[in-house]
Image: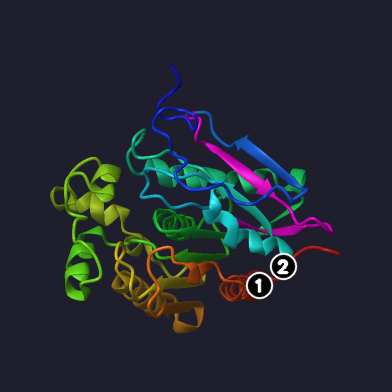
Amino acid sequence: MPDPNSPDGPNGIFVLPAAQTRHLSRKWLDLPYGVESPFQKLDVFLPDRGQGPWPVVVYVHGGAWMMCDKSDLQVEPALYGLTKGWAVVSVNYRLSSEARYPAQLHDVQAAIHWVRANASVFDFDPRRVAVCGSSAGAHLAAHAALQGARSKTIGVGAAVIWYGPTNFLKMDDYLRESGAGVADHGEVESPESRLLGGKISLLPELVRDANPETWITSEAPPFLIQHGTADPIVPWQLARDFALRLEVTIGKSRVELDLIPGAGHAGPEFATEENCRRTFDFLDKWLGAGGRT
């Protein structure tokens, strides 16, 4: 019987169509960055033309910490970076059916460390590494950026956060306030409760630890935070709060907040060419453009 927590197991995590990557000529798939789980793998994509050293964006997929995969269509906006001279590394991590928080964070940190340790193999520029994530992946990406701020091996130079949760205990209150969605994050079977291993209202210290805001310091990298104002799952007010807390600590010039009117959770607005260009203009601003052509 296949491992229920493997990508091919009966839990069936491939709930979204695969990203369109057949046309990409320089790619390395399912490379292991850890040995504890079959999910500790990543995909490497390099621009089809030119040579490095390439700046790298490490992409972390969404899926409520319980589903989806590094190879599904969520990665496509990040792959836009290939046209701008960026390498893209898409990461899987242990899901909540296999391991509780902070295992997922440790996996993302290990993947960032792997990128730097393998810089010479893929002609990455280890001085120019960014992290980007969507939804649950944005939560992990924000965490990794903030907790790694003082580390040369897992620190990053910039972070892009798409509709990510932060303070779990505020989610239901904000959803009731806006009326945008069902206020059910406090339930025992919610994704947040499954991630932490118990009803979140009973785990305030663990909720605090899992909140990226807890780890903001003056050494935090620049952040681009994007969120839809009609998000029915992760309330937009979390993005506002997160941006304000960052601004107080690292300054308004290093924090950019885009509240996209009418956009829902993982809406098509985030994947437009205009928004992809916006994302990589931000990354180029802080880490510089790509390799040699």
Q: Which quadrant would the N terminus be assigned to in this image?
A: top left
Q: Are marks 2 and 1 in contact (CB under 8 Å)?
A: yes
Q: Is residue 214 above or below residue 14?
A: below
In the displayed structure image, the side of residue 29 where residue 51 appears, left or right: right
The residue wearing badge 2 is: 84
The quarter of the picture where residue 186 lies is bottom left
Residue 174, given in percent of the width and then of the height, sits at 21, 70
> In the rendered structure, which amino acid carries the disc numbered 1?
Asp
Residue with the most extreme top position: 1
> In the rendered structure, which amino acid carries the disc numbered 2?
Lys
Residue name at image x 31 percent, y 63 percent? 234
Q: Say whether residue 85 is magenta.
A: no
Neighbour class for label 1 at 10 Å: few (<14), some, many (≥20)? some
The quarter of the picture where residue 276 lies is bottom right
Q: Which residues are magenta?
A: 36-57
Residue 240 is marked as none
Neighbour class for label 2 at 10 Å: few (<14), some, many (≥20)? some
Q: Is residue 127 above or below residue 111?
A: below
Residue with the most extreme left position: 202
Q: Is residue 259 above or below residue 81?
A: below
Secondary structure of the residue carrying numbered label 1: helix
The residue wearing badge 1 is: 284
